[in-house]
Amino acid sequence: MAFGDMESNPTYSKALDFAVRIVNLVDYLQGTKHEFVMSKQLLRSGTSIGANYAEAFGAESNDDFIHKCSVAQKESNETKYWLTLLHRTNRLSDN
């Protein structure tokens, strides 16, 4: 069951752009702040959002599509947690 073209989907594009920003942020955290534990968690969850959304395009049913999008939402929630924790522990500033 096909759910459209990923490349022209704005949500997919935003998730991919977000993953690129996460990768760059993790590079900064590891290279400048020498922060490896939380940054690895952030890398996993932040890049998983788009990966799960991309999987939804190959869903076998509407229910499968909804499930895969729900997993992407859960990864988004986890990513927000790691970003908040990194900010509150002064690994990230408002800038």
Image (tube, grey):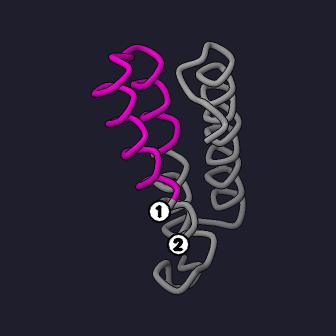
Secondary structure beneath label 1: helix
Residue 16 has which mark? 1
Which class describes the residues within 10 Å of circle 1: few (<14), some (14-19), or many (20+)?
many
Q: Residue, x 71% and y 36% (percent of image)?
A: 77
Q: Amino acid at mark 1?
A: Leu
Q: Is residue 22 magenta?
A: yes
Q: Is residue 34 above or below residue 29?
A: above
> How far across and how far down the image is residue 48, in percent?
48, 44
Secondary structure beneath label 2: helix
What secondary structure predominates along the stretch shown in magenta?
helix
Residue, disc 2: 13
The magenta span reads 18-46
- Disc 1/disc 2 C-alpha distance (Å): 5 Å
> How far across and how far down the image is residue 54, in percent?
49, 63
Q: Are marks 1 and 2 in contact (CB under 8 Å)?
A: yes
Quadrant of the image occupied by residue 95: top right
Along the viewing direction, whichever of 53 and 2 lies nearer the viewer:
53
Q: Is residue 31 left or right of residue 47?
A: left
Q: Point out the image quarter for the N terminus.
A: bottom right
Q: Residue, x 62% and y 13% (percent of image)?
A: 89
Q: Is residue 84 above or below residue 62?
A: above
Q: Residue, x 58% and y 80% (percent of image)?
A: 9
